[in-house]
Image: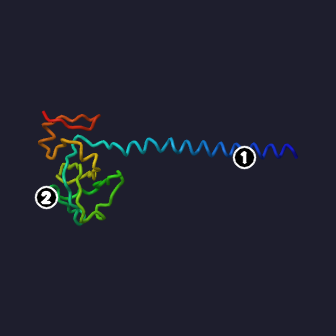
Amino acid sequence: MHRCADRAAFAGVSRRSLLVSLAAAGLTAALPAQSQALMRRFPRTALRGEIAFGAFPQITVNGKPAQLAPGSRVRDAANMNAMPGALAGNKAIVNYTVDSSGLVHDVWILRADEIAVQPWPRTPAEAGAWFFDDGAQRWSKP
């Protein structure tokens, strides 16, 4: 009988240790995901502008009519997928890419700290003339 009590006590400790280990592993796994949310990486082809979302796929980019491409992706400020139809009537400062047919393909709704990163090209001509540091995610004018 004394042996059973020892086993039960040992089993309780191992369960507690297992739970603590799992909790620590979960917290450790969550840390890289949180740090990724702090700095998003934008492609060199991303332009800065203001988008007003209309009835999907209609948008305006910097006051000019445009359309979202089939399969386009819109990411909100938390870098989560946003449904373009749910954004109808909203305006946002964004980085965006345009596909080969002139349709807006990728859209990132910017946070205040991302908007503060200046300069950022607003036209393909500016992007072609400026230098982009991919590591720092910064543009510089010649």
Q: Position of residue 106 (x, y in %)?
A: 26, 51
Determine whether, in the image, residue 18 is placed left or right of residue 3: left
Q: Do tag 1 and tag 2 residues touch (Cβ < 8 Å)?
A: no
Q: Residue 141 versus residue 57: which sits nearer the camera? A: 141
Circle 2: element type: loop
Q: Residue 107 versus residue 50: which sits nearer the camera? A: 50
Q: Mark 2: give few (<14), some (14-19) or many (20+) Cα within 10 Å.
A: few
Circle number at residue 63: 2
Q: Position of residue 88 (x, y in %)?
A: 25, 65
As shown in the figure, which amino acid type bears the numbered disc 2? Gly
Along the polypeptide, which appears first: circle 1 or circle 2?
A: 1
Q: Position of residue 37 (x, y in %)?
A: 37, 46
Measuring 32% from the left and 52% from the top, which residue is drawn there?
77
Measuring 81% from the left and 43% from the top, which residue is drawn there?
6
Measuring 23% from the left and 49% from the top, which residue is drawn there?
95
Q: Mark 1: give few (<14), some (14-19) or many (20+) Cα within 10 Å.
A: few
Q: Residue 29 versus residue 55: which sits nearer the camera? A: 29
Image depth: mark 1 or mark 2 in front: 1
Up the image or down, 85 lies above or below 74; here it is below
Circle number at residue 12: 1
Circle 1: element type: helix
Measuring 23% from the left and 37% from the top, which residue is drawn there?
138
CA–CA distance between discs 1 and 2?
65 Å
As shown in the figure, which amino acid type bears the numbered disc 1? Gly
